[in-house]
Amino acid sequence: MPVLVLPILLSLACAPLAYFAGRWRPGAAAWVGAACAVAALAALCWELTLGPARLVLPWAPTWGLSLEFTRDGLSGLYAAMALSVGALVVLYSRAYMPHHLAEEGRPARDEVRFQVLMLSFMAAMVLLVTVDDLLLLFIALDLTTIVSYLLIGFDRDDPESRAAALLSLVLTGATSVVFFAGAMALGLQYGTFSLPLVFERAATQPASTGALVCLAVGALGKSAQVPFHFWLPRAMAAPTPVSSYLHSAAMVAAGVFLLQRLYPLFEPAVAVRDGLLAIGFLSMTVGSLMALVADPFKRVLAYSTIAQYGYALVLVALGSEGAPLYVAAHAPCKAALFLTVGAITQVTGKKKLSEVSGLRHSLPVLAGASAVGAAGLAALPLTVGFFKDEVFFHALVEKGPLFMAAGLVGAGLTLAYTLRLWWGLFGGPRQDVPAAPRLLVAPVVVLAASVLVGGLLPGLLVAPSRAAAAASMVHGGASSLELAYHLDARAENLLALGAWALGAALFATRLTWTPMLTRVLEGTSKVGPAHGYRVLLHQLDRLSTWLHEKEVRDLRDRVASVLVPTGLLGMTVLWVTPLRDRFIAGSVGWADVTLVMALAFASAAALATLRARNHLVLVMLISCVGFSLAMVFAFAAAPDVALTSVLVETTFTLLFAGLLALLPDRRLERAQKEAQQPRGRDRISAGIAGASAFLLSWSALSHLQADRVGTQTVKLAEAAHSPNVVAAVLTDFRGLDTVGEMSVVLAALLGVTSLLKLKGKG
């Protein structure tokens, strides 16, 4: 087994192992899952010492599809981030979830489900960053969407939690579909979905702008960037471990990762990158301003995440080598703060800044560790966050004074809202609270230690940052990224000093400008994208209700709702398709008399069903139609199809006859009475559907090519090692269709069994 897949397999094994451990004892799920995550991290670190590698496994060779995986600096950095932070958050959940479940009145065994979902998301994230194929990227992206929906809506009895989960699913799911459209467009343009081949061909034939815009939309939706940002604050309804992991180190990071992985496609598209640059600065501004006035702890951090990934988006748009480093440095700082507010909520029962103060006296260790995380987020010296802002300022210096000013303001706002959060929690008048459980504090301490180590020993970050940059922003080239403290008057240092001064001034004067900013933001929220989403959802709900009233009340309307649009679509296709001699009337000879007689008998039986006054007679007439068509198949030299048709008709005729004998007589009489009173719209619907079916069949039969259809089908059946063409079609050529049809029949039978219960209620 190639070692490349070892971390992936270990990540995928975390959730099942945690589930089985949880079946033995619920508390064991977290420990087993965290241990497996650490093992996957160890395997990943070992593999990274071996250098880059790729693995290609054939999937559908005839379609040119393969399962492709890569191990390079970019995938290694993001996978290490997902596994390390994930292991700490899972351990934190061991102490957090029992209390949370008790407050919700739920059984302790629900903790196992929570841990399985968290570990499943971790595995999906590791899979996302290691695949090297556009289609697999989309599949992994959708996996993160589905699992995040389940995690955000984990408190299923809470209406706010359910609404937040639906919002995240709709928004990130819709943008994922747009990403899929872009991936398909690139696959059609380059004839492959393999990323190395796509990059190679894009060097001589740049990707289409439409495809790049679709890819960008998918990434922006995941990273909660404007105008898709409003789902992230609502997602704070989820338990704190979910917010800490998904919305700092995993799910939100996935969007920026996609842009970094696909950067060779975006590099020549200056207009698209300029658009990303504008969105990045806008997200920085919107997120920072909202974080300055938000009251709930987690919402402050959510808006901060929007702003911080706006920074990362700016770096990606500028083609900076520091983009991967920025995301990696942000993750432990933000995760530490999320875990801090979760611990405070558990020991105090409070969720807003206006409800707490002075907790540094009761929670000194948590206060100190979170202060380190806050310092890292605010990019203060001796923390890893200092270097994330250094690479940010370095990229802006090369663009000129306007960009430098924007970066200075953004960094100043970051310091202001970070100080506001930490001081609101731990500063001010003393408030005594119970001590936090050690397992709630220990992960914060570990994350704070990593923030300090990265700030004190920046040389440790150079090699992985260069490897990640070489695999993304400067694809295939060497990176010159340097990280060190420089005690001089270079522009980056001056910008940092200016940002700290601005942030301190904003924090000191917050009481003067906060009320005005709050009113402005409340006014803009009434016309923003969040308001548009609510209006759209309301209108869609009204439309759904109207359609339900029109369709479900009557079976004929329900059938018409399917047949009429299909018929109109079919006739539209015939209208716009430029076929020469579209409808051809062939000759009928004496050899065709038996075939014509069988068709005439089938038509007569079909017309007779319109006048049937008894359900049993109706079933028999319909069976006559089927048996007549079986005769047609037999006369058309298709005995195997005729035999299949006879078996199907016999089975269903007996089935319907038996069911009619079991159904309540009163309901049958009422249904028969309604059927004998056709409405005008019923005739119109039948006319549209029947005309479309007739014209499409005539057109198709007018352009049959025996060599293309018949001969090729026989050849393909032989290639499939099947002596029977029909069997080959059903089980091989149209195997998925057959499975779908069997599923429909099974669903129908389940419905029939429920109808049989009405026998005694008629």
Image (spheres, rainbow, N blue to C red):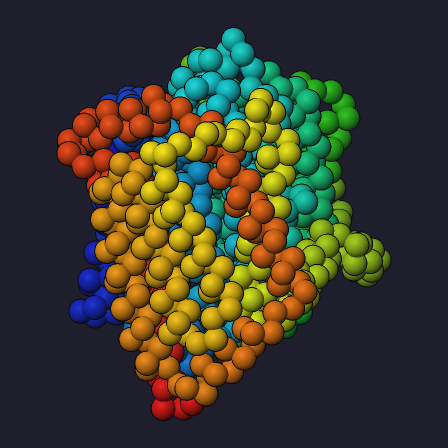
Q: Residue at 30% x, 49% y: name it.
A: 630
Is 13 situated left or right of 694 in this image?
left
Q: Is residue 517 above or below residue 357?
A: above
Question: Can residue 257 be seen?
Answer: yes
- Quadrant containing the C terminus is bottom left
Front residue of 122/337: it is: 122
Q: Is residue 696 above or below residue 472?
A: below
Q: Residue at 46% x, 29% y: name it.
A: 587
Question: Can residue 242 be seen?
Answer: no
Total residue callouts: 0
Q: Residue at 64% x, 53% y: name it.
A: 230
Task: Provide residue 578's location: percent of width, then percent of height.
Answer: 61, 25
- Quadrant containing the N terminus is top left
Is 36 situated left or right of 604 in this image?
left
Q: Is residue 655 above or below residue 334?
A: below
Q: Residue at 76% x, 23% y: name it.
A: 401
Task: Provide residue 76's location: percent of width, then percent of height.
Answer: 35, 32
Task: Provide residue 193's location: percent of width, then percent of height.
Answer: 41, 25
